[in-house]
Each structure stands twice: as C-alpha cells, then as structure tokens.
Image (spheres, rainbow, N blue to C red):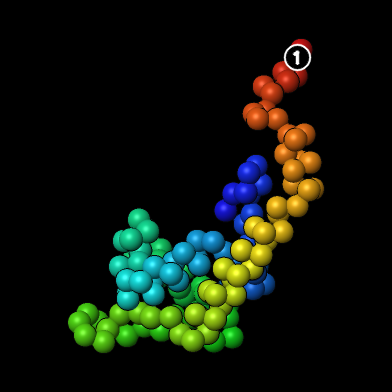
Amino acid sequence: MRVGALKIKVQLYCGDELAMGPGKADLLEAIAREGSISGAGRAMGMSYRRSWLLVDSMNRCWRDKLVETVAGGGQGRGASLTETGRAVLAAYRELEAGLAAASQQESLTALEAMVRDAPLPPVREDA
C-alpha cells in the first residue's frame, strides 16, 4: 500500500519463509469470496498451482491451518478460511491500517518534502 511517497509492505516470516504478506492476504480474501483456490487464483490472475503453493505455504507456517479444503467439485466442495484464517487475515489488515495511520505523522511529511519527484540520472563513472 502506498501512502504518498511511502510504500508500506508488512511481511511476517516463519523462519526464512514468508508466512503472510499483502499478496497472501489478498489470496485469503479471494478464497473467502470465491469459495475455492482455483476460483481465487483466476480472480487474481494466477495459476491454480501458484495459488495452491501459496495456500500450502501459509498452512505450513501457522500453528493452525488458515485454509481448509474439500477435494472435488460440486456442493460442499472447494476451500474456505478456517477460524484461524479469518483471525489472521483480520489481524493482518488491522496491522496494515494501523501502520498507514501512523505514517500520517510529521516525519513522513518532512521526508516527502526532501525527496525528489524523480531520481537524477545515474552518474557516469568515466565523467
């Protein structure tokens, strides 16, 4: 998320593996909305395999699964967020909102006043 010139990107790690970040949070929201991993992936423009790998990573990183799946198509099949999944997503979005609100302080205004609109061209080494 961007707040003026500031980009806020909250990432939570489990060892060296990304347990939660903006893309994974978006995927959880899409799964909740679409009711399946494949539908969520399509809605986000990613393959089923990529979506499934992200879900697998999340389910391995948290103490409890975030996404529950029931194989096959039809009634009662697909994917949904577990209670833990809903809680993690809500806490993550709350953290993002809190950081966005915190960024509205004078220090950001001071930094934005000192940063250029665009970088200068690179300096040539032979100049």
Mark 1: secondary structure: loop
| Residue that appears at 77% across and 41% down | 111
Query: In the displayed structure, would residue 38 be above or below residue 72?
Result: above
Which picture quadrant has residue 115? top right
Which picture quadrant has residue 18? bottom right
| Residue that appears at 46% across and 75% down | 56
| Residue 58 appears in the figure | yes
Q: What kind of residue is marked 1?
A: Asp
Query: In the displayed structure, would residue 50 be above or below residue 1?
Result: below
Q: Is residue 103 left or right of residue 64?
A: right
Instruction: Find disc 1 in the rendering and name its residue.
Output: 126
**Labels in figure, total:** 1
| Residue 49 appears in the figure | no
| Residue that appears at 72% across and 39% down | 112
Q: Position of residue 78 (x, y in %)?
A: 30, 80
Query: In the displayed structure, would residue 57 be above or below residue 65?
Result: above
Q: Quadrant of the C terminus?
A: top right
Structural crowding at the residue carrying mark 1, measured as other residues with C-alpha within 10 Å and reported as few (<14), some (14–19) or many (≥20): few
Q: Position of residue 90 (x, y in %)?
A: 55, 75
Q: As drawn, which residue projects farthest toward the top? A: 127
